[in-house]
Amino acid sequence: MRKPLVNALRWLVFAAAVVILNFPVIATLVTSLKSEAEIMTNASLMIEAPTLDNYAAVFAMADRFDILHFLMNSLVASLIGSVLAIALAFPAAYAMARFGVGRSWLLPLAVNLRAVPLIIFAIPIYLMYQQVGLLDTRFGLALILCLVNVPLVLVLFASSIADLPLEIEEAGRVDGAGTLRLLAYVVAPMSLNVVAASSVLAFIYSWNEFLFGLMLTTNNATPVSVGASFFFAASGGGVRWGVAAAVMILATLPPLALGLLMYRQIGRSMTAGAVKG
Amino acid sequence: MPRTSRFEGRLLIAPLTAFLIALLGFPLVLDIIYSVSRVGFENIRAPEPIGFSNYAKAVADPEFWAAAWFSLRFGLIVAVIQVVAGLMLAVFLAPLFAKRPWLIALLMLPMMVAPALVGLMYRLILHEFVGAVPYYLLEWYGDFPAFLGRDWAFTTLVTVETLQWTPFALLILHSSYAAISPDIREAAALDGARGRRLFVNIDLPLMLPALGLTFFIRFIDSFRVFDNLYTLVGPGAGGSTTSMSIYIYQAFFKVGDIGLAVAASMLLLAASFVVLWAINGLTARKAPL
């Protein structure tokens, strides 16, 4: 008798949680689909006359603020940052798991690094970048995104490689394969799951990074997490809320889509990253 | 392992080590040097040693302590609320997730949005004329507070941070709750434990490590809060919402006091070490259980 009632309550709580937790995105999406005039007169979540004008307006102001340029900066820097983090962490994790090299200091360093506010390193990095000409470059930003991602990726790889069966590698050794060959043809293929999962998470974290994007770029390499706020001041006087909302939705869409498609891998990586760290 | 494999191992960690030395080690050395120097953009390559006066200046600055207090209070409050809310949701909704695992994806979505963008979104949502929240509060209660004013800014920020990151607590605690073996619950049920007693005496103790872990991760993340705070209020609300990260950022970019900013960074680093040391101590003691 009571069971269906409790179950209904569960669904109710679930639905409420979905709406409340996702409210910022929902409300912004709704605003982005209203006309400029309607936004001023109707602040509710109901849309009287849905329109895509705001999105058209965003792309129409490309001569002053180029959303595609910001999105491209985020895409390029995030891709380089994630791939580089994996390329650096994968062999290191293998060396730790199989040879015990660096396990006593590199892993604890990486784990603890996640707990250290990175702003501590932001100022000297800014000054370094200024000297070597990396300020406001996509590559300079990518290096930092890699730094942000390395701890998580290293922890995920270290635990997953340790779980791989040793026999296959030993068989490869007997057949005369060197370490690099083993890494490329045996360990890497067996780790594809973890590579995929951690690269998705690394990409999302990179895309969403803000502090270093704010400090290390001014215009050329500005990521969309920083560039989005430029549109708030785009029209000089008051904020064009429709345009601002459309920009925020465009900037949020890529990680949101990835999150929906790969939620299982992301969830597993987040959990493993938290527990193993 | 023979000597060659140790050598190979060193080769394999060399790229990562070099990278960390360049982007972490070198900046740390610069941090230390600049923190005991008189330094500005004009003598960035030739800082002039002045002892510990930058540290003295930071420690004597009431705003430094206000920022430290803000971060600490913010981190603690947010972490507690998130763990409690995440736990309640994880346990209450567990039967739904067990049948339809994809449901949890909808609750994970807030974590996919950049905190900086979430801050910007709330600028729209809380806006007195065009925002949905004031609109409905006005509709239902006839009034709404100044969300970003001095009295309400802290509460607003706590809410914003909590709503975005409770999903993390939910995710970790859900997987820990789901990992409890049904055998244990059955055995306890045979012994007559059910409902709340089962939860308090069996589930909660088993989830304790996960609860502690979640709390620490959320505390650390919220302690260093920058993005959403910067985009939503900046240093606004009369400086009452300046976190440690914002303080350092402003000392550097707004005031241009490199020495002060760097000294504050080093103090923050020292504070992080204390926290880490405490966490490692606690988890090491728990490990044998």
Image (cartoon, helix red, strand yellow):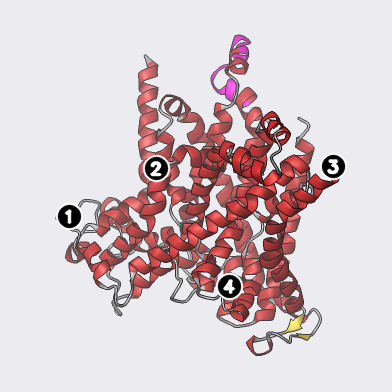
Disc 1 element:
loop
Q: Is residue A211 left or right of residue B120?
A: right
Q: Callout 4 environment at 10 Å: few (<14), some (14 to 19), or many (20+)?
A: many
Estimate the x, y position of residue B25 in percent, counting from the top left. 73, 66
Subunit of mark 4?
A: B
Mark-to-mark CA distance, 4 and 1: 41 Å
Mark-to-mark CA distance, 2 and 1: 25 Å
Query: Looking at the picture, which amino acid does disc 2 mark?
Result: Leu
Q: Tell me which secondary structure the magenta stretch mostly adopts.
A: helix
Quadrant in the picture for the C terminus of chain B: top right
Q: Which residue is mark 2?
A: A260
Q: Which residue is mark 3?
A: B2
Disc number placed over residue B249 in the picture, else none: 4
Q: Tell me which label, 2 or 1, sits earlier in the chain.
A: 1
Subunit of mark 3?
A: B
Q: Which residues are magenta?
A: B187-200
